[in-house]
Image: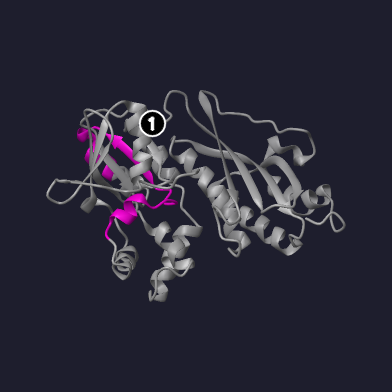
Amino acid sequence: MADDRRDEFGLIDDFFAPLAKGQPGALGLGDDAALLDLPPGHSGVVTADAMVAGVHFLADDPPQDVARKLLRVNLSDLAAMGAQPIGYLLVAAWPRDTADDWIGAFASGLARDQALYGCGLLGGDTVATAGPLTLSLTAFGSVPAGQALRRDQARPGDCIFVSGTVGDAALGLRALTGDIAPLASADREFLVDRYRLPSPRIDLGVALRQRIHSALDVSDGVAQDLGHIVRRSGCGAEIKLGALPLSPAGRRALAVLGADAALALTGGDDYELLFTAADSRRQEILDCAQDVGLTVTEIGRMVEGGGVRVLDDAGQPITVDRPGWRHR
């Protein structure tokens, strides 16, 4: 923000100190660092993600949605480890011409999701920059000791599940950039909302503790993210393309594009949970998902060997040119 309008401390007092109310460890944002207490018998879980204007969100996205997405993608990482949120740190590099109204709306988005997900601001930093708006958030959570969900425990024979529907966010981005036309207004609104406001599956992650072998959240595409479980666990995976859960809006958008479900397999920003579990746990997992108001779908199996294979309805391998989003 412009130095001649508001200094860093005025910005913090006006927009961000209110976000720390109710967080005892934040100390009113008046000290050099925060204090973090964990429930007895719990381990801390820490994650961080950065978002840059023009890379991770569009420059004209509503500031409330930018803030909420920033918080939610971090909470999704906590969900993928079965953790409950505690609080977060925020670092913001504001372009010098950022308006107070924009920052105020950004802070209101954070306030809305803090109330929704039960966490608060613990501290952070703000700076001015000549470059694009750059945001970084570090989220803290807790999980009972020894119960954190991890990527390295999948076993051959495990069923592979994914929550919700996939591909919506990638299609929503295409809708925003004009790549899908014509598209019914209700479908466009649904897909854009899925891109701008992912839903961290915290309740599902907590419910899956001690029931599954491995888990992560889908940020870069199902195929690419499953590859992380494959490499960490030392086994392979087979996915049935026809088993991917698609939303009605997503199916219609794919039809408009003349594309198949492979786009949903490789699109990023879903932030659904992808996890593996023993076949004997299938019904228990379906029941857990229903209890928290979600659906989960079995999309394949872990196998001996390595790599991720995508199969068609006849069980034949399909070549996927680009398995997912690459960060560089």
Residue 306: % across, % down: 27, 30
Q: Is residue 61 visible?
A: yes
The stretch drawn in magenta includes residue 285: yes
Label 1: state its secondary structure.
loop
85 lies left or right of 239? right
Q: Mark 1 belongs to which amino acid?
A: Arg
13 lies left or right of 141? right
Q: Residue at x 47, y 54 (%)?
A: 198
Task: Give the extent of the magenta segment.
Answer: 260-286
| Quarter of the image where the N terminus is located | bottom right
Q: Residues within 10 Å of mark 1 (few under 14, many from 20)?
A: many
17 or 41, which is in the foreground? 17
Residue 197: % across, % down: 50, 57
Which image quadrant for residue 285? top left
With respect to residue 49, does 295 lie above or below? Answer: below
194 lies left or right of 105? left
172 or 87, which is in the foreground? 172
The stretch drawn in magenta includes residue 297: no
Find disc 1 in the rendering and name its residue.
Answer: 151
244 or 297, which is in the foreground? 244
With respect to residue 5, does 50 lie above or below? Answer: above
With respect to residue 238, does 4 lie above or below? Answer: below
Q: Residue at x 71, y 58 (%)?
A: 103
Q: Residue at x 74, y 52 (%)?
A: 130
Q: How many marks?
A: 1
Residue 205: % across, % down: 41, 40
